[in-house]
Image (spheres, grey):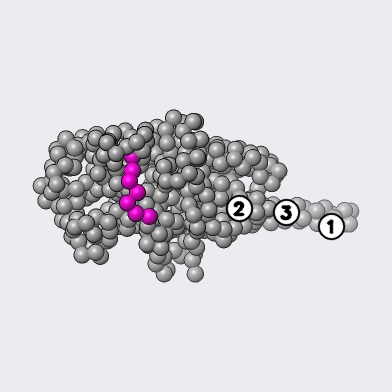
Amino acid sequence: MRATSLLGSLLLAIAAAVPAAHAQTGASPAGALKLGVLTDMSGVYSDFSGNGSVVAVQMAIDDFGGKVLGRPIQLLSADHQNKADIGANLAREWYDKENVRAIFDTTNSAVTLAVTAVTRDKNRIVMIGGSSTTKVTTDSCTPNSVQYVYDANALSNVTGKALIAQGGDTWYFITVDFAFGHGLEKATSDVVKAAGGKVVGAVRHPLNTTDFSSFLLQAQASGAKVIALANGGSDTINAIKGASEFKITNSGKQRVASLLTFITDVHAMGLNLAEGIMLTEAFYWNLNDETRAWSRRFFEKTKRMPTMVQAGMYSAATHYLKAVAASGTDDTAAVMAKMKATPVNDMFAKGGRIRADGLHVHDMYLMQVKKPSESKSPWDYYHVRATVPAAEAFSPMTPGACAFVK
């Protein structure tokens, strides 16, 4: 009886040790490798992310052969409705019940911050697309997140410095009233002030505003040379349409700068309204043969050209799957280490690298929207005014800003 009892106790101890070791490594059991796209599928940001991000990640899975380490790759998708609590709950459910190993996109900064916190707690990976907040690489940074496409500093450095150099030394901000807009306004204000410019005022507006008349009149009355839109999606479109109606864009005295504009925004407005606007891009479909080839494949599936977020999510999913294959495991720490050690070289970025704090730094582009007479074909909307190297586009890490970076 005693020997049997001792043997039983030993077996129980061994059995208990196995899941404990598994929890420490963060690897998943054999079966399908599940990825998720968590994004805005129906709201203000759905055009530049949304279903297009789902299509892009599925393209990456298909191009990878649909399998990694002999396991099928399965994609889930969901609409976070631009609500942080919904995003966090969906992420938690995916991690706990579906064993999702990595989430992509999370467009909306408030949602992103909520999802990165859950991802850290569950020891999984999130590859951030359409969120600019610098909090994810500073006071809210985690070892489990990658900000892949842009951040507020990159958007501000490229467009802000260019307009200051052209004489735009006084600025007024029209800012969407949540974390994304606040961060973008602050980052750009810092760039303007550092370059000797002045911020003469700012006004906040709710998300998904349709009538910008009062905000634009305040901006116009300020006399600022640059009216900066620190918003995105349909908010940006509606603001630019309003600026055109008030003749601000063609006044010669004031210039509208959009700090986050997507090619889908320009398409929705038309070149008659958008012409001349300066903006920052991480990707343009018509940049070279490689971008054109991939974008035409995307167009066949969606009937529109990709935004930088959608192209970035294809690149992010591909980079993740390559890291899983190279590591021989989906263990979180191993995959993150491999992604940070491996340069990104594809249609989205050349020589891109993921820093210790999780920011993917790569070249950015200063664009100017063409006049209607300059466009040679549908979706041919941009002049590439400058290629801004990664070291100039992205601000360097601030020592101590990210707690886990030593």
Q: Main secondary structure of the magenta part?
A: strand
Please tell me the numbered disc located at residue 323.
2
According to the picture, the residue beneath numbered tag 3 turns out to be: 18
Q: Earlier in the sequence, mark 2 or mark 1?
A: 1
Q: Which residues are magenta?
A: 381-387
Amino acid tagged 1? Leu
- How crowded pointer 3 is (Cα within 10 Å; few <14, some 14-19, many 20+) is rated as few
Q: Is residue 384 magenta?
A: yes
Q: Which mark is residue 136?
A: none
Q: Amino acid at mark 2?
A: Ala
> Do residues under tags 2 and 1 come within 8 Å of each other at their CB atoms?
no
Precedes in sequence: disc 1 or disc 3: 1
Badge 2 crowding class, 10 Å Cα cut-off, few under 14, some 14 to 19, many 20 or more, is many
Residue 176 in which image quadrant: top left
Q: Label 1 to label 3, Cα distance in Å? A: 19 Å
Task: Indicate the amino acid at tag 3.
Answer: Val
Image x and y of residue 267, in percent: 33, 34
Residue at x 19%, y 55% (from the top left corner) = 168
Q: Secondary structure at mark 2?
A: helix
Instruction: Say which of marks 2 and 3 sits in front.
Output: 2
Q: Position of residue 158 (x, y in %)?
A: 32, 55
Q: Which mark is residue 6?
A: 1
